[in-house]
Image (cartoon, rainbow, N blue to C red):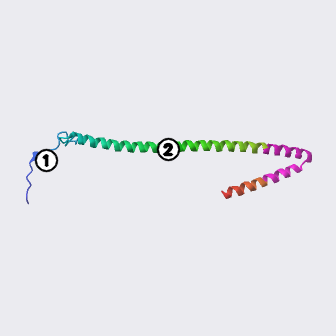
Amino acid sequence: MSQRVRAPGLLRDRSTLLGTPPISGRSSPFDGIQANGHRYADDLEGQNDEALEGLSSKVRQLKDLTIGIGNEVRESTIQLSQMNDAFAETGSILSGTFRRMNNMASKQGCRWLWYIVFLVVVFWFFLVTWWFRR
């Protein structure tokens, strides 16, 4: 069998295996600056402008989104106030109906119980049919 010759210092030394690394081990944006540094600065300025345009478009999108949310909240508030008015009106109509029904029940005696049962059954029927149509 052939034996490998290992030199202990050569296997652990990266510079002999990979060549000379950069001084700090990291690359820098200023590595390789040519004699004309203005061109590199212009490139960085262009990248900053592109990033700024991207950020401004995202800010514009967020602004449009928040304006849309604000409009939706205003419209929902108007609809809720209209619903509140409609429910208040319905409540007053129902209270008047129940008042008249109680007057009728006090005049007629026991038959008012059957009228109430009939009204409850009719109301329940409409409620069930509405529920299954949704």
Expressed as whole percent of the image width and height from the top left, the position of residue 33 reads 20, 41
Q: Residue at x 31, y 44 (%)?
A: 47
Q: Mark 1 is on which residue type?
A: Gly
Residue extent of the magenta highlight: 93-120
Q: Secondary structure at mark 2?
A: helix
Is any atom of residue 53 visible in this view?
Answer: yes
Crowd band around label 1 with a 10 angstrom C-alpha radius: few (<14), some (14–19), many (20+)? few
Expressed as whole percent of the image width and height from the top left, the position of residue 10 reads 10, 47
- Position of 77 with respect to 38 (left or right) is right
In the picture of the structure, the residue carrying the numbered disc 1 is 19
Q: Mark 2 is on which residue type?
A: Asp
Is any atom of residue 29 visible in this view?
Answer: no
Q: Judge by depth and name the residue closer to the eye, 126 or 4.
A: 126
Q: Judge by depth and name the residue closer to the eye, 70 or 129.
A: 70
Rendered image quadrant of residue 87:
top right
| Residue 71 inside the magenta-drawn segment | no
Q: Judge by depth and name the residue closer to the eye, 66 or 40.
A: 40
Q: Secondary structure at mark 1?
A: loop
Residue 89's disc is none
Q: Residue at x 70, y 56 (%)?
A: 130
Please state which of the two labelled residues, at mark 1 or mark 2, is closer to the viewer: 2
Expressed as whole percent of the image width and height from the top left, the position of residue 116 reads 83, 50
- Seen as rendered, the residue at the extreme bottom is 1
Q: Quadrant of the N terminus?
A: bottom left
Expressed as whole percent of the image width and height from the top left, the position of residue 65 reads 50, 44
- The mark total stands at 2
Magenta stretch, main secondary structure, is: helix
Q: Quadrant of the C terminus?
A: bottom right
- Of callouts 1 and 2, which one flags the residue occurring earlier in the amino acid sequence? 1
In the picture of the structure, the residue carrying the numbered disc 2 is 64
